[in-house]
Image (cartoon, rainbow, N blue to C red):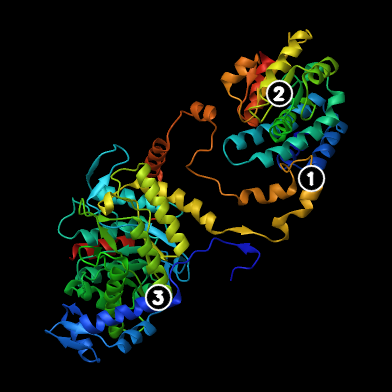
Amino acid sequence: MADILQEMASSLYGGEQEEVARMVQGALDQGMSAAEILSNGLIAGMDQVGRDFKAGDLFVPEVLVAARAMSVGMDVLRPLLATGDVSSAGKCVIGTVKGDLHDIGKNLVKMMLEGAGFETVDLGTDVGPVDFVEAVRKHQPNIVGLSALLTTTMVNMKTTIEALEEAGLREGLKIMVGGAPVTGAFAEKTGADAYAPDAATAVDVARDLQEA
Amino acid sequence: MIPDTIAVPQFGMLSREQCESIHRASLEILRRTGVRVYHDEALDLLRQTDAVLIDDNRVRFQPGLVEWALAQAPSRIPLCRRGGDEVVAPLEGQIVSFGTGSDCLTYLDPRTGERRPFTSADVVDCVHVVDAMPEMQFCMSMGIPSDVGSNPYRAQFAMMLEHTNKPVVFVCDDRADCEAIVAMASAAAGGIEQLQINPSLLLYSEPSSPLRHSETAIGKVLYMAEQNLPIVHSPAPVQGGTAPVTLGGALAMANAEVLSGLVIHQLKRAGAPMVYGCGMHQLDMKTTISVYTSPEFILARVAVAEMGRFYGMPTWGYAGDANSCVVDEQAATEATFSIMAALLAGNNLTHDVGYLESGKTTSPEMIVLCDEIISMLRRFMTGMSLDEESLALEVIHEVGPDGNFLATQHTLHYFRHMWRPALFSRLGGEAWARAGGKPLSEILREKTVAILDEHRPELLSDSVHDEVEYILKSE
């Protein structure tokens, strides 16, 4: 029984999306629970990816293909998971703030979060405060992630957070910010709960926010 | 041949006509002024040619004799790993191999930061660093141990032979030293014939500028020729002191010194392997030190690489050396300048990596720093591909204006071709601060000490070790 989970973890490590989806289905057909497949197959594989990334043996593109395979596996599992099954992951609405078309950093964070089992809603780029407010109302996320690359647009993080406050959505919602010009000190001024300097750290920060 | 879909950095200084004009100037120095040769056998060899001797030992050369010698010298020398036929420093074409310098009196100890006299243990530590560093293709002794009895050169060679399997460029006092050293190398190679076909050592000797070949230097040169083992007989004229202050004059004179050495060498054994080289320095007229890595020093290095190729001989080079007394910003700047120039010019056997204080101090940290700089610049020298896969039109079209290239197969396939540092930091400010906020100097020290503590080279077999010990004792 455990063999298929080990193979699943190893296929996920290699970014083989179709294999992973097939194995998740196979494990379900063998009668394994969604929670078991998630923690001993998919998350076990991603944990190895995370360890090897930190050790410098794997690099961002490899982490991303593994994350994509994770996300494909999660698509099969998600309808079957009871809410209590996935204690570590949550839902995240993410976007690049108004006036800014840069999305490579935001996409990196999104893919990394999905790799860690988070469900993400990507609002894209040039997202105004009103659009963030609407998305939070609609998707009820645990976390909102705001991204900016330009020093001229990073100020819109603050206006977005203010809009969420005015709409009465701020309580219980965790907001994290990031992007090349953003620093911890700037993040504090925007009123965000957390800041991560890079995509890999963003996953750790999101996990910490969930547990807080 | 490099295919035309690969674009590489290219560099050149001397035109063919300019090489010929330097060559003619040197021929004229050898004809009109001549050189002094303080060695009887060499003078006997020269008497059998059309060279003209005046005042017993001052020799004037006919151009034809010099050009005969140039035609004999081989165009490649494959320096091999100890005990095998694997070429680790192919001295040919524009391939650059790097190694350390020799014989410093002062050691800059990475464990304590102290500058102090070299000991045997320090030489062994330094050899371990050379053995561990992937961009070091050959080893020179780095230090003269102050705690060894009468003959430090044989002891140095034994330490290098024992503690690295990379080829060794050695310095020694006289012919007897050469014989002992060749005997040690032969033991490790499995006999003199093996050593000749797979040379894992090369003698460094010098004419004494201006225009003199000493008895001990020529004694070594003739012995190595007799054994058909490679040498470099490279003068180190100091511009403004032992050579004209101008680069052109110093080069013409140094070239005459090299060519007259080559004539003697080839008269002993035509076809014996010799590296073309001269190490022109400049006399700093304020401090009177002999300068390393000045703009003029680097111009001279480029000229040597190009003159050597003009003559069809492998070339000698200098890089990774600094005038600074410590591994600081000046040392890093001077190292980068000289390493880049060596790679662009194509000096085949480029030594002195790790030198500080204008060649009086060796620092293992400087070697580790230079290894990173060499690695970075070697990648620069491989240039860029412009073939269909590299132009990537298919993936550009697939991704289009709104996508990204992060997790495409094309990125996955090629991203590992990009150079990544082993030492230099690419952390952002906050991550860097979290990791301890260390400057490069601190990371360099930690890495160097870890190599000293942990790296253990491939040892000699017990029987070869015993033979080396025996040769050392029968001094």
Q: Which mark sits nearer the N-terminus, 3 or 1?
A: 3
Q: Position of residue B472 (x, y in %)?
A: 22, 62
Q: Which residue is mark 2?
A: A146
Check disc 2 and give the amino acid type.
Leu
Circle 1: element type: helix
The residue at which mark 3 appears reads as B19
Q: Amino acid at mark 3?
A: Cys
Q: Nearer the viewer, residue B409 or B263?
A: B263
Q: Secondary structure at mark 3?
A: helix
Which chain is mark 3 on? Answer: B
- Estimate the x, y position of residue A15 in percent, counting from the top left: 74, 41
Q: How many marks?
A: 3
| Of the pair B134 and A139, the residue shown nearer to us | A139
Give the residue at mark 1: B399
> Which of these two is toward me, B251 or B204?
B251
Q: Position of residue A49 (x, y in %)?
A: 66, 36
In the displayed structure, would residue A161 be above or below residue B63? above
Q: Quadrant of residue B285?
A: bottom left
